[in-house]
Image: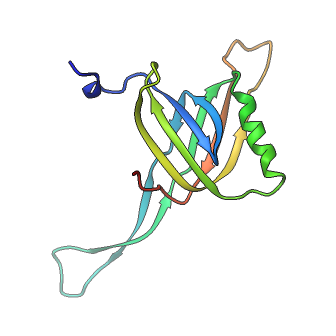
Amino acid sequence: MPTTDDPAVSLYFSVQVDGHDLGAFTSCDGLGFEVAVEQREEGGNNAYVHMLAGRIKYTNVKLTRPLNGDSGKVAKWFATMAGTVVRTQAQIVARRPNGEQVSSWSLKEVIPVKWSGPQLSVDNAKVATETLELAHHGFLEMG
């Protein structure tokens, strides 16, 4: 059976923003968009209500991973901003454990919204994780 037809069961997500490799993340949530829809009723038309497409809203992308050697890459990227946040491009690539690319998404006009570092405590045996949240203005066409 060809592996290209297999569903992507176990994945990780490699992330690059403005050419900065931010490493691998184990969770990627929020790749999507919504279209605001206005309803308009037309007098004499009882068959349906007109649904007019409005603005597109892109949801923020949340990337999560356990604390590891790549965690410092996010801090290095933040340091390049020097207090000024500039919109840039990002690429998220879903990969199988062997590194094979399953799919990818290119985001335009990306800015960091939030970074949450791990909550470290000797009283808690949980895995220390970090989360990076990115806002964007849409997807770039894939060549």
Give the image location of residue 32, x and y in percent.
45, 50
Give the image location of residue 86, x and y in percent.
71, 58
Classify residue 96 as left or right of residue 88.
left
**Residue found at the far right of this picture:** 82
What color scheme is it? rainbow
Classify residue 52 as left or right of residue 77.
left
- Count the numbered circles shown: 0
Splitting the image into 4 quarters, where does residue 100 fall? top left
Which residue sits at x=52%, y=40%?
92
Which residue sits at x=17%, y=78%?
46
User: In the image, is residue 77 above or below residue 101?
Assistant: below
Which residue sits at x=49%, y=49%?
106
Foreground pick, 54 / 76: 76
Foreground pick, 29 / 5: 5
Give the image location of residue 73, x and y in percent.
72, 33
Foreground pick, 131 / 3: 3
**Residue found at the far bottom of this picture:** 43
User: In the image, is residue 99 above or below residue 40?
Assistant: above
Where, quadrant-wise, is the N terminus in this rendering? top left
**Residue found at the far left of this picture:** 47
Which residue sits at x=83%, y=54%?
83
Give the image location of residue 140, x and y in percent.
47, 56
Classify residue 3 as left or right of residue 68.
left
Classify residue 125 as left or right of residue 8.
right
Splitting the image into 4 quarters, where does residue 115 fall? top right
